[in-house]
């Protein structure tokens, strides 16, 4: 787990250093051009790492896309995965969660910080889940496990644009993880 976090941190730092020069040159022109609000026709793609969340999972991955339906209103799609195991005295249960969500996003300049896009999102979708239980000893009868179903989420989100197209993103709330961090790219 520590190696995964270290690798992600390294990729993030390398990405930031690669765009630092472009960000500083665009900073002077950014004062006249707002980079933060989603506009009609915009398309944004990204990936996230989710921390905490679905049932007992402590870590997950996701990919997301958002389309600017109108100025400051976005419609999004989300695909995420998390998995975890639980140990009990006589058996072990393992779970995997694949979330497929659609979202309604309302962008508003809540914090009034240059290059920062803030929005609230409401999501609805399905958790394609699987569960398996294995006995640790002999003929122990393993209890039935169940998972999956309709899921929803509510998040507060932000995107800090380092360039006109490249952003660091974060989400907090109820969904795949209580906190998601990642990178977004606007086409």
Image (cartoon, rainbow, N blue to C red):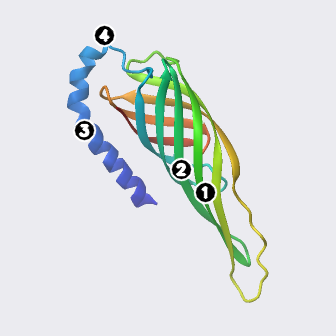
Question: In terms of secondary structure, where does tag 2 sit?
Answer: strand
| Label 2 to label 3: alpha-carbon separation | 28 Å
Frontmost of labels 2 and 4 is 2
Q: Residues within 10 Å of mark 4 (few under 14, many from 20)?
A: few
Q: Which residue is mark 3?
A: 17
In the rendered image, residue 14, in percent from the top left (x then y), is placed at 27, 44
In the rendered image, residue 109, in percent from the top left (x then y), is placed at 49, 17
Q: Is residue 46 left or right of residue 151?
A: left
Q: Is residue 178 visible?
A: no
In the image, what residue occupies the spot 64% across and 44% down? 125
In the rendered image, residue 180, in percent from the top left (x then y), is placed at 51, 42
In the image, what residue occupies the spot 58% across and 47% down? 100
| Label 3 to label 4: alpha-carbon separation | 24 Å
Q: Which mark is residue 80?
A: 2
Q: Is residue 68 left or right of residue 148?
A: left
Q: Residue furthest top?
A: 32
- Quadrant where the image shows the C terminus: top left
In the image, what residue occupies the spot 32% across and 13% down? 33
């Amino acid at each position: 787990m520590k190696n995964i976090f270290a690798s992600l941190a390294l990729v993030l730092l390398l990405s930031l250093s690669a765009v630092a020069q472009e960000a500083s040159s665009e900073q002077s022109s950014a004062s006249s051009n707002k980079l933060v609000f989603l506009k009609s026709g915009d398309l944004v793609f990204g990936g996230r790492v989710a921390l905490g969340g679905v049932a007992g999972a402590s870590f997950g991955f996701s990919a997301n896309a958002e389309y600017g339906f109108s100025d400051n209103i976005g419609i999004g799609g989300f695909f995420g995965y998390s998995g975890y195991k639980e140990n009990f005295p006589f058996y072990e249960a393992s779970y995997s969660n694949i979330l497929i969500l659609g979202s309604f996003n309302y962008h508003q300049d809540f914090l009034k910080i240059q290059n920062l896009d803030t929005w609230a999102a409401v999501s609805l979708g399905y958790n394609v889940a699987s569960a398996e239980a294995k006995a640790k000893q002999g003929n122990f009868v393993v209890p039935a496990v169940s998972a999956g179903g309709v899921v929803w989420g509510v998040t507060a989100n932000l995107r800090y644009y380092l360039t006109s197209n490249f952003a660091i993103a974060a989400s907090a709330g109820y969904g795949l993880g209580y906190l998601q961090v990642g990178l977004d790219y606007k086409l």
